[in-house]
Amino acid sequence: MRTIGLIGGMSWQSSRLYYDRINQMVADRRGGAHSAKLIVNSLDFGPIAKMQTAGEWREAGAVLANAAQSLERAGADVIAIGANTMHKVAQQVMASVRLPLIHIGDSLARELKSDARSRPLLLGTRYTMEDPFLIDHLGNKGIGAVTPDKADRDALHAIIYDQLIKGIITDAARDAVRAMIDRSSAKEADSVVFACTEIGMLFPPTEAGLPGYDTLEIHATALVDFSLG
């Protein structure tokens, strides 16, 4: 079994879900008392969130690069960034270590293509929906992602940063996100992607009204595949 090095804390709410899912998958596949070989470098998200707001992405990337180097020194065999938005600095992180990085966008693209999905509705932070880093990543693989209208993007961003990263889950937020998905019919979306690792805290992708894809679950599966492969 190879050791997974996870850069977490962005937010810690989703990092605990990564820890749970990765270990549960290993236990399911190996049986008995098996669990994952996993090193988590959990960052303080407060300063990183401020860097995001200020557009200081290179500085934020340096923080993640240092975290990746620490994981490499600690004996990890692969690096993962436990957040969609911070894949904006994935190239900077990859350049800082010799280890492979399993990119959340690659894992997602494989799942979408295997199901012949080519026009997913992408739900995430404002940065993920409005900056082209993930949309272009998918586009280079033949997948034309669409995003909600601006009012919905703003509302979803607020739900993520004001509620979900703090562990606050409300029926109002569930209803708001479901309504965003319902409105995607005007964009002819053939599926919906939870491109923020906290969105699945509201409801599972099977209850999204469209074929749903949770990037946390997909990413965790790819990491376990690598670890046990």
Image (tube, rainbow, N blue to C red):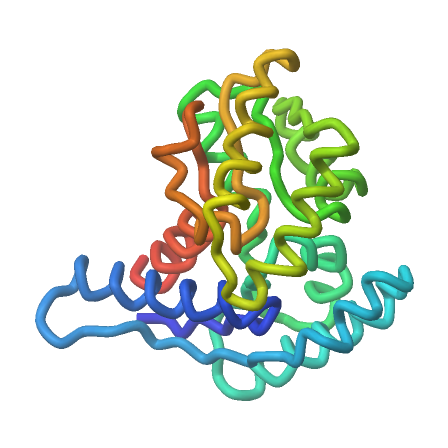
Identify the residue shown where x is 41% and y is 56%.
Answer: 220
x, y percent for residue 62: 79, 74
Identify the residue shown where x is 18% and y is 74%.
Answer: 34
**Quadrant occupied by the N terminus:** bottom left
Give left or right: position of 18 versus 84.
Answer: left
The one of 12 and 26 positioned closer to us in this rendering: 12
From what the image shows, is residue 215 above or below residue 137? below
Give left or right: position of 133 versus 227.
Answer: right
The one of 105 and 193 positioned closer to us in this rendering: 193
**Quadrant occupied by the C terminus:** bottom left
From what the image shows, is residue 189 above or below residue 164? above
Identify the residue shown where x is 72% and y is 76%.
Answer: 46
x, y percent for residue 82: 55, 63
Residue 29, quarter of picture: bottom left
The one of 162 and 23 positioned closer to us in this rendering: 162
The one of 156 and 13 positioned closer to us in this rendering: 156
From what the image shows, is residue 5 above or below residue 100? below
Number of callouts in the render? Answer: 0
Furthest-front residue in view? Answer: 172
Residue 54, quarter of picture: bottom right
x, y percent for residue 135: 70, 35
Identify the residue shown where x is 43% and y is 31%.
Answer: 208
From what the image shows, is residue 202 above or below residue 110? below
